[in-house]
Image (tube, rainbow, N blue to C red):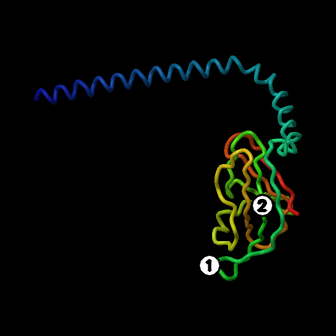
Amino acid sequence: MSTGAKVGVGVGGGCLVILLVIVVIGFLIGRGASGDSDTVTPPPAAETSAPEEEAEVPAEEEPEAADTGVTMTASYAGTAGDVLDEEAVYTVIDVTIENGSDEDVEVNPLYITATLADGSSVNDWGEVLFADIEQIESGTLAPGDSASGQIALVGEVEVTQVELQPVFGSNEPVAVAPVS
């Protein structure tokens, strides 16, 4: 066996030993962590009442979406066709978003959901790419800035409200607007 082959086997064997040690240590740490969680089982049971109370709070805080400083208006703008499919019909909503907060706000048609008269929440953005509308532009609204444009929904539907959803974080909308 050549010297290079001996060095390669030696280095490869050493790496294998190090990898094996890391796996064993990881296994022991993982086993120790799961053992600790078994002993902590009673406190989470005691905390069960706290999450229920917290679950009620977001439902009450939903109207506070207007307190974020971001305001939105929405109005029915009729129907529109498709630039490729002559038979397609879309419901169009004019949307204006104003950032009255102290922080930047991300605006994108992907983040706008519509609530229909039947209570369902939809975002047809992927299906209305070729709707003949003046789509609201994606971007970051600095404090004091505003953006206007349109969103579309597949078919002729009755929209009761639109919501601007956050990019990350809570599930509460950044702004909510009834459709007039």
Question: Could you tell me residue 72's position as x and y percent?
Answer: 81, 54
Q: According to the image, label 1 marks what residue?
A: 84
Question: Could you tell me residue 142's position as x and y percent?
Answer: 69, 46
User: Of all residues shown, which one is farthest toward the left?
Assistant: 2
Instruction: Check disc 1 and give the amino acid type.
Output: Leu
Dot 1 falls on a residue whose secondary structure is loop
CA neighbours of label 2 inside 10 A, class few (<14), some (14 to 19), many (20+): many
User: Of all residues shown, which one is farthest toward the bottom?
Assistant: 86
Question: Could you tell me residue 127's position as x and y percent?
Answer: 66, 67
Residue 24 lies, with reference to residue 66, above or below; the image says above
Marking on residue 157: none
Instruction: Check disc 2 and give the amino acid type.
Output: Val
Observer-nearest of 143 and 21: 143
Marking on residue 95: 2
Question: Which residue occupies 64% across, 80% down?
Answer: 85
Dot 2 falls on a residue whose secondary structure is strand
Question: Which residue occupies 70% across, 18% down?
Answer: 40
